[in-house]
């Protein structure tokens, strides 16, 4: 009996099997890293795409980081106050955006009336939230209409924590600039009440720098 040879063969076979498995584990860990706070990072709890029932993205384009700007808007639609209702609303928005050929939900993150942050495209993928700023800004949308009603203290805390988290993780620049969407686009978003609240944040800037090069979003579809 060639016991040694059999053991060597078994070891080689095991290595062949474990090699791809190790790669999958590494990729899974990398994907989870964007949602797992690093030690010392002031990251809020983020409701991942799988938890709110996201459909698979049909378009992927990555954004260079650290990202210098954050644009805040509101969805101007239904408000929500629980994980269940907010997840349903985020899912509905994704369906609407996909029907408009966005390929996915347009926002990077969304903040619900429950004070939780919902993962849209996340840190690493270019969004479709603000014409001219998709390549250089993270887009954060508050779920609901904030024309007359201000965001809650919990929602504002979630935004502050998200920005701090991005800076500490190296996803956002240390001198990140925060705008209300109305500052860079002809829109009422994020609503007057929320816009006034944004002005209390240290990252908010009144004067927007010279217009960036307009980015006509070119989707890289899986079908291509």
Image: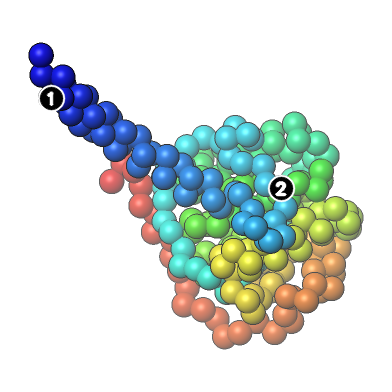
Mark 2 or 1, which is nearer the eye? 1
Identify which residue, 82 or 171, lies in the foreground: 171
Picture quadrant of residue 5: top left
Q: Position of residue 126 (x, y in %)?
A: 49, 59
Q: Position of residue 24 (x, y in %)?
A: 38, 39
The number of numbered badges drawn on the structure is 2
Q: Position of residue 209 (x, y in %)?
A: 61, 84
Picture quadrant of residue 6: top left
Where disc 1 sits, the SS reads helix
Residue plotted at (43% across, 59% down)? 62
The residue furthest left is 1
19 sits to left or right of 127: left
Q: Badge 1: few (under 14), some or many (20 or more) residues near its Cα, within 10 Å? A: few
**Quick one: label 2 or label 1, which is nearer the N terminus?**
1
Identify which residue, 89 or 100, lies in the foreground: 89
145 sits to left or right of 177: right
Residue plotted at (62% across, 56% down)? 38
Picture quadrant of residue 129: bottom right
Residue plotted at (72% across, 68% down)? 180
Identify which residue, 216 or 71, lies in the foreground: 71
78 sits to left or right of 19: right
Res. 74 mark:
none
Q: Which residue is mark 1?
A: 5
Residue plotted at (10% across, 14% down)? 1
Q: Which residue is mark 2?
A: 45
Any part of residue 40 in sight: yes
CA–CA distance in space, label 2 to label 1: 52 Å
Any part of residue 100 in sight: no
């Amino acid at each position: 009996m060639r016991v040694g040879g059999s053991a060597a063969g078994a070891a080689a076979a095991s290595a062949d099997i474990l090699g791809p498995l190790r790669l999958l584990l590494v990729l899974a860990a990398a994907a989870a890293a964007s949602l797992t706070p690093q030690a010392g990072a002031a990251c809020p709890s983020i409701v991942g795409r799988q938890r709110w029932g996201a459909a698979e993205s049909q378009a992927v384009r990555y954004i260079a980081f650290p990202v210098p700007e954050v644009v805040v808007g509101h969805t101007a639609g239904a408000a929500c106050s629980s994980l269940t209702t907010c997840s349903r609303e985020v899912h509905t928005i994704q369906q609407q955006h996909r029907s408009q050929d966005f390929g996915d939900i347009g926002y990077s993150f969304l903040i619900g009336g429950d004070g939780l942050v919902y993962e849209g495209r996340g840190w690493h993928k270019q969004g479709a939230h603000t014409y001219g700023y998709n390549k250089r800004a993270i887009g954060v949308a508050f779920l609901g209409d904030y024309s007359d009603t201000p965001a809650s203290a919990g929602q504002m805390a979630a935004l502050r924590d998200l920005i701090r988290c991005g800076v500490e993780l190296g996803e956002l620049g240390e001198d990140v600039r925060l705008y209300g969407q109305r500052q860079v686009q002809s829109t009422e978003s994020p609503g007057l009440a929320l816009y006034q609240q944004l002005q209390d944040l240290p990252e908010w800037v009144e004067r927007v720098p010279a217009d960036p090069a307009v980015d006509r979003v070119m989707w890289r579809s899986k079908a291509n």
